[in-house]
Amino acid sequence: MRGGRRVRSGRTVPAGADPLRPVRRTPPVPPVRSGRQGGAVAQRARSSPTLEHLVVARQLQRAREEYGRLSFAEAAERAGTSHMSIRRLESAATALNPDLIRRLLRLYGVPAAESRGLMERVEAARRPGWWHERYRTVMSAAYQEWIALESAAFAIRLWQPALVPDLLRTPAYTAALHRAEHPRADRREVDLVVELAAERQRRLAQRSARLWVLMGAAALHTSVGTPGVRRGQHAALEEALSRRRVNVQLLPLDAGPHPLLACGPVRLLRLDAGEVADHVVAESPMATTITGDGTAVARLRRALDATAALAAFPRTLVPYLPDVPDTPQETEHG
């Protein structure tokens, strides 16, 4: 992921032309993360927080408020640390420090059994995500956070107006798209991006998560890669129509106005974790925005429902497919 910016907690993100841009979040879950998907970037040593890390952060906040009844400043003074250290701990913006957490739990008066359970979660949360070791060089911190949430989602609903959705792309389509977006990417970078995309798809199927895709018919006409790449992608989409736990809806080219008309790619990640809300991931050419703001989540759900009511559940894509000419022999990855 190249470029991008990080929007810090407490700031409002300008809405621009996208009606689904999030408004505000409150701790403990980091409210907004921004950065572009794709491309190699320099990485900090720590992996972006996994869902387990976010859950621990939320439980630490609750322990301070409900057991300790302390403000950030009061807790910091009694624990011999800074209030910013505790703020960052509760927003999952820093690595988990077991010694500090034990000290805080004793300070707050958390019952022994609950403390033991939380410390077990701390140990699990300190392990980096599956993507960290191999793929972090082609992922920004924001993209890592996105994948952390996606990896824990029991259901994913997404809207993709002009491209085949990432979770249904073939390796050749993924490679061709990445090269178009990042012309200077070397072969190793492209291979890692393709491998990461395939691993995301594999893990989604392995845990039997539900995928509900709403895509514009224009995506079938967008020229990505060679004609052979496009034909292969169309065949893969045709196969996806018959998969269990995958729903594919197609919005016709002549569909009328709908709530997602001016919206870019966006998805709703449904999470089965009481401490962590469902999240919206909204993509744009310059940044990826992630939020668990309840208002943004509810607005996206309504927009998806209303737009889906205008879309078809095709049994076959044949009536929607453009003519793609035959071509000479093509290279690997298109």
Image (tube, rainbow, N blue to C red):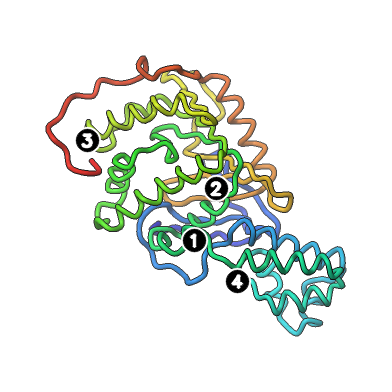
Q: Which residue is mark 4?
A: 95
Q: Give the mark, 3 or 4, whose residue is nearer the N terminus.
A: 4
Q: Is residue 122 above or below residue 146?
A: below
Q: Amino acid at mark 1?
A: Ala
Q: Residues within 10 Å of mark 4 (few under 14, many from 20)?
A: some
Q: Is residue 214 above or below residue 148?
A: above
**Residue at 41% over, 20% down:** 253
Q: Give the mark, 2 or 3, whose residue is nearer the N terminus.
A: 2
Q: Which residue is mark 3?
A: 226
Q: Residues within 10 Å of mark 2 (few under 14, many from 20)?
A: many
Q: CA distance from mark 2 to mark 3?
A: 30 Å
**Residue at 67% over, 53% down:** 25
Q: Which residue is mark 2?
A: 150
Tell whether 179 sits left or right of 152: left
Instruction: Give yes or no for contact between labels 2 and 4 (Cβ–Cβ under 8 Å).
Output: no
Quarter occupied by the C terminus: top left
**Residue at 64% over, 36% down:** 299
Q: Residues within 10 Å of mark 3 (few under 14, many from 20)?
A: many
Tell whether 280 sits left or right of 63: left
Q: Give the mark, 1 or 2, whose residue is nearer the N terminus.
A: 1
Residue 291, percent from left and from top: 61, 50
Residue 36, percent from left and from top: 43, 53
Quarter occupied by the N terminus: bottom left
Q: Nearer the viewer, residue 173 or 121?
A: 121
Q: Give the mark, 1 or 3, whose residue is nearer the N terminus.
A: 1
Q: Amino acid at mark 2?
A: Glu
Q: Could you say whether the residue bearing mark 3 is in a helix, strand or loop?
A: loop
Q: Which mark is residue 141?
A: 1
Q: Give the mark, 2 or 4, whose residue is nearer the N terminus.
A: 4
Q: Could you say whether the residue bearing mark 2 is in a helix, strand or loop?
A: helix
Q: Could you say whether the residue bearing mark 1 is in a helix, strand or loop?
A: helix
